[in-house]
């Protein structure tokens, strides 16, 4: 919304300093809206009025020194010119204060505004009265707010004001915002405050968590009964980390309880006291870097000697990369052949990381998210990671909040969407700065965070609390072991939310299937239609044409391919069973589906109102692959018990369980098609229930024709019809496998 007085301020700049090209003051758009462009122009105008020859957008040390040496403070007796005063009046309006009529007079309205500004900044005790001091002018000519904005916290604002008031006279301390929000500037001001209270002189205190600061903090443990400025600093740090405590100078028993909760959350020693490692965790993202982690990650192959060294050093979980597109850079970055077997042999567990570049904002897009999801899932399947493994997708740069909104979130939304379309074989985690991890997780696009806290200077770490769902906290690079066992790693604290994987599928002896080549669509369709016509099943009497059925199967190729790779079977098995069933979906099936809905709800669905629903059926074979709720439960229960699938064991005889599964099968094509491989596995394991089957080998990449026939037959059950259909489906399997074979380059 335009502000009349801001508009007048813009006109003043344009009119007075219209020769912008010569003076270095850009002409402003007269829109009545404040912003950095306006503040830069006012800063340059102020520098010009003070006689500074080289104008700059930055209100830096030279500008501050000139103000201090020339005037000391600004008021009605020291303002050097009317235009100088108009600059102050304009800046006050841009900050939301009454600057008078921009008439060049330091009048009562200006004085009242300055007094209010000093009060809002928290410096009125240091700078009483109505004068403007140089550091206040510096704060006036930026976009910091000194009142709460965007639902800011009044408690945080009180901390900001306290810091300003207590330390503004120190040489390198500048007025920080008092907007009720933690930020990079506030985090740095807390470190300055710690250093000042430790007795560091101006010029020594630098806002860095260095050896001197750490040494000093080790002798300033606070605990129940403590009081004074150190408790104020500690409670302030707790508040800024979003812990539910009061900003206070007294260390109460209630505060001790909150400290214990924080220590437990951060995996620190639970003492209820403000110990050094607690101070460190509150003040810098990496905390106490001397802590020994249980997790690590690195770009070096885990050999037996290195595995032994890691285990001896106390490590349990190892992060390794799924993929490295470079053949020359970091040759051991990607998991190497036999490496996961070594990790398992030495009792370690592995959590996979996916990162190719991911080091600048222009990497991130929905298209890249699609590619990375597919590549990560395929590589995880190739390396042998089982379903339910969590893959950490990387944000390996200092992503500012606006970039998280514009680029990072769309990228992760696409990863989530595509992983869902694959049948959710793997969980999604995020590696990155705190803010990116928290925002991506809040969107539901990741369920655990691997936090790059080692990068303490990242704006996405400074001023942000630890993500609630953190799994690994990366705090320092170190070297472990010696000789052949020596390895450089990043040392990570583990929360226990993710324990990685300790068992893996063996490396496949044959190539896994890959995605369909759409250029082959026409020839595949022709062969399928010709074959179906040759056996008297052209599809005309069914609800869907053969082309519609095949189109549907190919449209879910990513789902089918991922499932085939995951369970080490040929995708032709899934394609054949699903296509055959869908091609035989008839009006009878349509009526039965409507009857099931009627049975469980008492309501005939709109799509079935014109159908002759005469029965109330408990269950029916439904969806693309015509699977019943009961069969789905039996097959998935078998895979859950076998450790192939995460989930809850359901009761195939329970109406509610069957209805829940039936609805998913009927309405979710990904779920329906993702269930097909479990039916094949269950069929091979030996179906429990009405008809016992003799177990055969689970579907494998080297299945024989006899095994293919047997598992295809078992999909439909027993009897002459199942046998006949299995014989008819074998040539169909051969057609699908012919194209899959060509695509995988064999």
Image (spheres, rainbow, N blue to C red):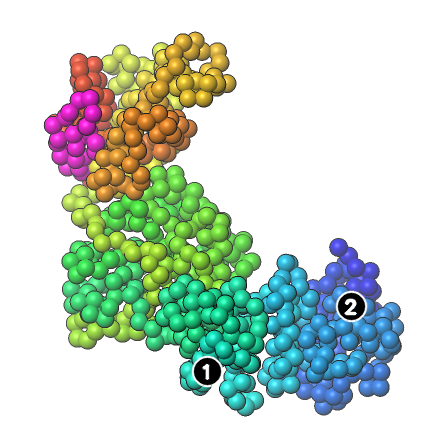
Q: Is residue 542 left or right of residue 743?
A: right
Percent x, y of residue 429: 38, 53
Q: Secondary structure at mark 2?
A: loop
Quadrant where the C terminus sits is top left
**Numbered circle sitting on residue 220:** 1
**Magenta residues, start to end:** 681-703
Q: Quadrant of residue 420?
A: top left
**Numbered circle sitting on residue 97:** 2
Q: Tag count in the figure?
A: 2
Along the polypeptide, which appears first: circle 2 or circle 1?
2
Q: Is residue 506 in view from this perspective? A: yes
Please name the residue shown 77% across and 76% down the image. Answer: 115
Q: Is residue 690 left or right of residue 615?
A: left
Q: Is residue 132 left or right of residue 673?
A: right
> How packed is label 2: few (under 14 Cα within 10 Å), some, or many (20 or more)?
some
Percent x, y of residue 78: 82, 86
Q: Is residue 590 in view from this perspective? A: no
> How packed is label 1: few (under 14 Cα within 10 Å), some, or many (20 or more)?
some
Nearer to the camera, 439 or 6: 439
Q: Quadrant of residue 548?
A: top left
Q: Secondary structure at mark 1?
A: loop
Percent x, y of residue 605: 48, 19
Task: Compute the Cα span from label 2 to label 1.
Answer: 41 Å
Percent x, y of residue 46: 75, 78
Q: Main secondary structure of the magenta part?
A: loop
């Amino acid at each position: 919304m335009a502000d009349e007085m801001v508009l007048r301020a813009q006109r003043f700049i344009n009119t007075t300093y219209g020769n912008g090209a010569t003076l270095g003051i850009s002409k402003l758009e007269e829109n009545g809206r404040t912003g950095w462009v306006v503040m830069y122009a006012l800063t340059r105008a102020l520098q010009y009025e003070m006689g500074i020859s080289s104008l700059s957008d930055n209100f830096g040390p030279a500008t501050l020194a000139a103000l201090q040496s020339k005037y000391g403070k600004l008021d009605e007796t020291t303002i050097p010119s009317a235009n100088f005063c108009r600059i102050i009046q304009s800046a006050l309006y841009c900050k939301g204060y009454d600057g008078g009529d921009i008439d060049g007079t330091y009048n009562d309205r200006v004085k009242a505004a300055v007094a209010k500004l000093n009060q809002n900044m928290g410096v009125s005790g240091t700078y009483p009265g109505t004068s403007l001091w140089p550091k206040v002018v510096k704060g006036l000519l930026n976009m910091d707010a000194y009142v709460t904005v965007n639902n800011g916290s009044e408690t945080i604002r009180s901390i900001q004001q306290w810091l300003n008031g207590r330390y503004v006279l120190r040489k390198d301390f500048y007025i920080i915002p008092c907007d009720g929000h933690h930020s990079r500037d506030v985090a740095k001001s807390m470190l300055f405050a710690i250093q000042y209270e430790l007795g560091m002189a101006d010029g020594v205190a630098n806002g860095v968590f260095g050896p001197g600061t750490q040494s000093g903090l080790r002798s300033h443990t606070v605990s129940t009964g403590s009081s004074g400025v150190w408790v104020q600093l500690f409670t302030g740090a707790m508040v800024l980390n979003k812990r539910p405590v009061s900003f206070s100078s007294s260390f109460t028993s209630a505060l001790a309880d909150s400290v214990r909760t924080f220590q437990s959350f951060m995996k620190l020693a639970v003492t209820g006291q403000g110990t050094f490692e607690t101070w460190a965790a509150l003040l810098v993202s990496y905390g106490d870097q001397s802590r020994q982690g249980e997790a690590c990650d690195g770009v070096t192959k885990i050999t037996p000697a290195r595995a032994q060294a890691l285990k001896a050093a106390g490590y349990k979980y190892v992060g390794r990369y799924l993929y490295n597109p470079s053949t020359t850079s970091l040759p051991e970055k990607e998991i190497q052949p036999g490496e996961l077997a070594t990790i398992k042999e030495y009792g370690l567990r592995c959590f996979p990381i996916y990162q190719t570049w991911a080091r600048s904002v222009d990497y991130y897009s929905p298209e890249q998210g699609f590619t990375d999801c597919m590549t990560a899932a395929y590589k995880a399947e190739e390396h042998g990671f089982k379903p339910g493994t969590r893959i950490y997708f990387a944000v390996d740069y200092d992503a500012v909040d606006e970039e998280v909104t514009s680029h990072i979130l769309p990228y992760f939304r696409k990863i989530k969407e595509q992983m869902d379309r694959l049948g959710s074989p793997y969980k999604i985690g995020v590696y990155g700065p705190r803010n990116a991890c928290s925002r991506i997780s809040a969107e539901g696009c990741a369920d655990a965070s691997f936090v790059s806290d080692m990068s303490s200077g990242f704006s996405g770490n400074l001023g942000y609390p630890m993500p609630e769902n953190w799994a690994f906290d990366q705090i320092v690079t170190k070297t472990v072991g010696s000789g052949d066992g020596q390895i450089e790693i990043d040392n990570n604290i583990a929360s226990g939310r993710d324990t990685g994987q300790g068992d893996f599928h063996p490396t496949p002896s044959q190539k896994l299937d890959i995605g369909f080549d759409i250029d082959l669509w026409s020839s595949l369709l022709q062969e399928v239609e010709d074959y179906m016509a040759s056996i008297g099943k052209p599809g005309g009497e069914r609800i869907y044409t053969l082309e519609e059925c095949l189109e549907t199967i190919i449209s879910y190729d990513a789902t089918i391919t991922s499932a085939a790779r995951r369970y080490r079977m040929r995708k032709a098995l899934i394609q054949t069973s699903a296509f055959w069933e869908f091609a035989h979906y008839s009006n009878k099936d349509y009526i039965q589906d409507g009857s099931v809905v009627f049975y469980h709800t008492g309501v005939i669905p709109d799509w079935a109102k014109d159908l002759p629903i005469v029965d109330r059926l408990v269950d029916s074979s439904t969806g693309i692959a015509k699977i019943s709720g009961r069969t789905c439960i039996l097959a998935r229960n078998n895979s859950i018990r076998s450790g192939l699938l995460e989930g809850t064991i359901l009761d195939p005889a329970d109406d509610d369980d069957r209805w829940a599964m039936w609805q998913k099968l009927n309405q979710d094509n990904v779920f329906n098609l993702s269930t097909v491989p479990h039916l094949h596995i269950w069929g091979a394991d030996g179906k429990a229930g009405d008809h016992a089957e003799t177990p055969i080998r689970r579907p494998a990449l080297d299945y024989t024709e006899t095994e293919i026939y047997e598992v295809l037959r078992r999909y439909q059950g027993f009897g002459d019809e199942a046998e006949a259909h299995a014989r008819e489906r074998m040539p169909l399997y051969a057609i699908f496998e012919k194209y899959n074979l060509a695509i995988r380059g064999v």
